Image (spheres, rainbow, N blue to C red):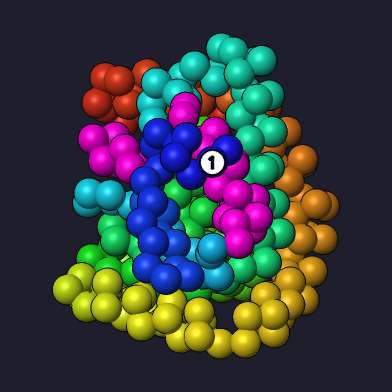
């Protein structure tokens, strides 16, 4: 894809720094439909772009990304072909982020939930507004964090903390996320833009090839791990999507009530 072909991601450029903004603010930048597809193209397109040395990824409106939306989740439950397409795209998102040799900075302007958190955590440097929260609450709707969360969270904060957050779905306030090493920096909202710009400019002014090859080298182990885990994670998520508990979660969300899980 060419950048002008994107519909759900907008772009701005400042020198060699490209900013990509998830731009579906009325849906809290939920990663579904066109946005899911475009994210699957974004990182390879940036890697191939000779005008870009640094990518900044952020969200429009009050969220970075709220993850998946209810209609998309419900559709995937009853559409095996659509789910298989979503799996292919999810793998391209994760592997695209890992394989992109250019530094990617996540500017988490608001909540990053589910796949939104996964996308942010697979970036290289993560800044977040101190009012933002990060979390992967797949289990709260009867699903498995198979689209990358089970890969990246333990690498960032260790298995003990990661298991707590992935098995409960609890959200992490940005200051706590920075303190435990889940993200790099938590800043007041009014300081976020300037801090990210300064950091991006610092990387853009650095030794380009040394920076890129350092990232590639560090990502070798992560890439190997993702190849070992991604298919299994997506398969378990597909299995969970047809359980009675997941169906109950969808019904409870529609009816605005607490789900009553039965373990089926």
Q: In the figure, 29 relative to 193: above or below?
A: above
Q: In the figure, 22 relative to 226: above or below?
A: above
Q: Within 10 angstroms of label 1, few (less than 14), some, or many (20 or more) residues?
A: few
Q: Which residue is mark 1?
A: 2
Asked whether the viewer can see residue 264, the reply is no
Helix, strand or loop status at disc 1: loop
Q: Residue at x 22, y 49 (%)?
A: 61
Which residue is nearer to you in this view: 61 or 169?
61
Point out residue 58 in the picture as x, y percentages from the top left corner. Answer: 37, 57
Asked whether 35 falls inside the magenta stretch, the response is: yes
Q: Which range of residues does the magenta coloring cover?
A: 23-50
Q: Quadrant of residue 226?
A: bottom right
Q: Quadrant of the N terminus?
A: top right
Q: Residue at x 63, y 35 (%)?
A: 89
Which residue is nearer to you in this view: 236 or 108?
108
Left or right placement of residue 45 versus residue 253 in this view: right
Q: In the figure, 10 relative to 193: above or below?
A: above
Q: Residue at x 56, y 87 (%)?
A: 206
Asked whether 36 falls inside the magenta stretch, the response is: yes
Which residue is nearer to you in this view: 256 or 223?
223
Point out residue 245 in the picture as x, y percentages from the top left corner. Answer: 51, 25
| Residue found at the far top of this picture | 78
């Amino acid at each position: 894809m060419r950048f002008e072909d994107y519909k759900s991601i907008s772009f701005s450029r400042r020198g060699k720094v490209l900013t990509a903004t998830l731009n579906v603010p009325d849906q809290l930048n939920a990663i579904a439909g066109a946005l899911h597809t475009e994210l699957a193209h974004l990182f390879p397109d940036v890697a191939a772009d000779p005008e870009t040395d640094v990518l900044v990824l952020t969200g429009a409106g009050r969220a970075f990304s709220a993850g998946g939306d209810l209609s998309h989740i419900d559709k995937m439950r009853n559409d095996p072909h659509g789910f298989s397409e979503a799996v292919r795209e999810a793998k391209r998102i994760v592997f695209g982020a890992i394989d992109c040799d250019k530094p990617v900075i996540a500017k988490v302007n608001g909540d990053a939930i589910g796949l939104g958190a996964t996308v942010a955590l697979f970036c290289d440097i993560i800044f977040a507004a101190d009012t933002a929260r990060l979390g992967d609450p797949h289990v709260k709707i009867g699903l498995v964090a198979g689209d990358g969360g089970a890969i990246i969270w333990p690498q960032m904060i260790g298995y003990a903390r990661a298991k707590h957050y992935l098995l409960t779905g609890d959200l992490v306030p940005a200051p706590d996320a920075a303190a435990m090493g889940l993200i790099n920096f938590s800043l007041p909202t009014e300081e976020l833009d300037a801090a990210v710009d300064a950091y991006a400019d610092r990387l853009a002014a650095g030794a380009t090839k040394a920076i890129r090859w350092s990232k590639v080298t560090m990502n070798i182990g992560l890439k190997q791990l993702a190849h070992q885990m991604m298919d299994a994670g997506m398969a378990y998520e597909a299995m969970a999507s047809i359980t009675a508990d997941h169906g109950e979660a969808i019904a409870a969300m529609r009816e605005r009530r607490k789900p009553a899980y039965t373990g089926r």
